[in-house]
Amino acid sequence: MILAAALLAVMAILLAWPVPLALARSTWPDRAPGTALLLWQAIALAGVLSLLGALLVSGLAPYGDHPVAAIQVLASDLTRAEVPPGTTWASALALAAAVLLAGHLVANLVFTVVRTERQRARHRSLLLMLSAPMPEAPRTRLLDAAAPIAYCLPGTVHSLTVLSAGLLDLLTPQEVQGVVEHERAHLRQHHALVLVAFRAWRIALPWFPVASRAQDAVGLLTEMLADDEARRSVPDPVLAEAIAAVATGGGERGADVEDAAAADPASVERRVRRLVAPAPAAPAVRVLVPIASIALVVVPPVLLALPALAG
């Protein structure tokens, strides 16, 4: 199993730094945000699977030629309160690291989801007290605030779109329509689920700079996807004007009120630029990147099965 462990370790290292760094510096994601978002998710999932797989296979190597058989041998010896033959400090540490890391990631994901839902529940309660419903727009609340504010608040049963009086005063009716369609696109496409997963990854690995970079990139990509949905209802120049106006007016934007990664001036500039001067993605990108994304997720399980295939 040493070969499988080595290959998984190499893959984990590549997905931890050079691959996401190259993707973050690329320009093609602006032209194909959905494809880029798929790739980011594949990189995150494959990176975690590779790291856990490398640690697990390294720790199980003394007990057999296949992870399943090795686990059976290890479990059998441990149930008899015996130290399995061949156990070394290195294998024990690798196994402990795999178990602790997996538990840490899962527990942190659950904690982040629960905390996010509680924050949204408190936000919803305050919002219902401080805002008024808009009869002409179902599930939309109006804040009596001078700043141009627009965001969506996901909910388990009912989601809300929040606008401010300042936004309605600042924008034309068509621009308001574009902003509303943008926010509702976040809800329809369930961007909050993607964002909470990447937020949990960043919180779980705060010392991992790629996790923060990935969260920022994914936040911007969800904004672009919502822009693409909104541009079906209003012309691109109108939507670009609305985005720029809200940004310069100090309003709140984002697929989720907990995420502000896409609200910085550089991100707003990229969003406006792709609307003002749209450019289609190369056909090869739309074909090859999804294939690469699927391959990234499939390779770690295949490498785990490699010892069995090798006999």
Image: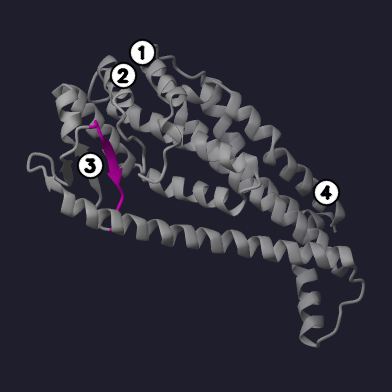
Q: What stretch is highlighted in magenta?
A: 147-156
Residue at 76%, 71% (x, y): give it: 71
Measure the C-alpha gap from mark 4 to mark 1.
Answer: 47 Å
Residue at image mark 3:
162
Residue at 26%, 58% (x, y): give it: 157
Measure the C-alpha gap from mark 2 to mark 4.
Answer: 48 Å
Question: Which sits in the foreground, 125 or 46?
Answer: 125
Q: Is residue 154 in the magenta section?
A: yes
The tag earlier along the polypeptide, 2 or 3, is 3
The tag earlier along the polypeptide, 1 or 2, is 2
The circle drawn on residue 276 is 1
Residue at image mark 2:
240
Say whether residue 187 is visible: yes
Measure the C-alpha gap from mark 1 to mark 3.
Answer: 26 Å
Magenta span dominant secondary structure: loop
Assess disc 4: are there few (<14), some (14-19) or many (≥20) residues with their C-alpha within 10 Å of its C-alpha.
some
Q: Quick one: quadrant of the C terminus?
A: bottom right
Q: Tell me: residue 118, above or below residue 282.
A: below
Residue at image mark 4:
6
The secondary element bearing badge 4 is classed as helix
Residue 186, by quadrant, is top left
Q: Quick one: quadrant of the N terminus?
A: bottom right
